[in-house]
Amino acid sequence: MEAASRHLVPVVLELGGKDPMIVLPDANLENASTAAVWGCFTNSGQVCASVKRLYVHESIADRFTDLVLEKARRLRLGDPLKPDTDVGSLIHLRQVELAEGRVRDALREGARLALGGRKRPDLGECFFEPAVFTDVRQEMLVAREEIFGPLLPILRVRDEEEAVRCANDSPFGLTASVFSRRRGIDLARRLKAGTVMVNDCTWTHAACETPWGGVGESGFGRTHGRIGLYEFVVPFHVSVNHALDRQSPWWFPYDASMLEIYRASVRFAGGPGRLRAARDMLRHGFLGRIRKRK
């Protein structure tokens, strides 16, 4: 953006995210837990739209966490070119070191590492086990800073209001997801994100017919779809005065009656009281100002 600004070149920025997922008591827990595991660990968590923080209603938190752990334990870490591999490596050793640091931060702040979170040098220098954290609080780094890796923090919430408040408590706003049989769309409309998915997660960047982009520190502008195409064009407007033999009533000269006409025209455009506004415009000589050209 800095480089483009020197030449007034417009830009579209799709940046990072700290994408929340909310699970309500009426959700299909089997589907939601499978989605959470895939949404966080697909591509080893190296997706801007990965599920990066999970808010679960306290009434179902134990059951849901058990399902997530059960499914995450079955993930097969290994060579991504093999068809029976679920999770491959991180892209660089720096990302492995970053993931290790995030694990240490979470443990130091009081989170519990329920699964994984270790390097796997037996598979290669960039392999890292998918990690699941419980006992996570909103203020912890693992719940606030973007982690481009396979780390999933699970946070309990008392109700929908707390879920929405915590999900929106972030400078990022790329994607979000809500799992609920009845309340999904209602909550989706309250979340601050460029895309909110209901009973699904992560994938819409691959749907080329839908607009893609974020808000806040997740960037601005859109790619994909009709809205995305509009980012690459410059709107052009032509205005034509078809009354060739008449002057505009707004042209010089001005006098006191012109001020009254202007005030009445504003009221006329505003809707209510149009009839009275039109009478006032006529009374102050509106038609007389539309003079024939000399």
Image (spheres, helix red, strand yellow):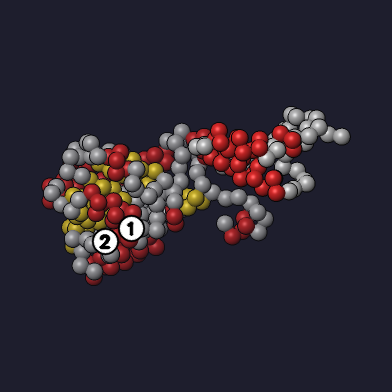
Asked if one can make out residue 239 in the rendered structure from this viewpoint, the answer is yes
Sequence order check: which comes first, mark 1 or mark 2? 2
Q: Evaluate whether residue 48 shows in this view.
A: no
In the image, what residue occupies the spot 69% across and 45% down? 257
What element does badge 1 sit on?
loop
**How dense is the environment of label 1, judged by Cα within 10 Å: few (below 14), some, or many (20 and up)?**
some
Along the line of sight, the residue nearer the viewer: 115 or 249: 249
| Residue 153 locus on image (x, y percent) | 25, 56
Say above or below: 241 vs 66.
above
Question: Residue 232's x, y, as percent?
Answer: 59, 41
Residue ID for mark 1: 169
Mark 2 and mark 1 in contact (Cβ < 8 Å)? yes
Counting the numbered discs, the total is 2
Residue at x 29%, y 40% (from the top left corner): 186
Which of the 4 image quarters holds residue 85?
top left
Question: How far is the residue under mark 1 from the one under mark 2?
Answer: 9 Å
As displayed, is residue 146 above or below residue 243? below
The quadrant of the picture occupied by the C terminus is top right
Whether residue 267 sits left or right of residue 32 in the image: it is right
- As drawn, is 80 to the left or to the right of 25? right
Residue 182 appears left or right of 9: left
Which residue, given by chain and number where applicable, does mark 2 sit on?
138
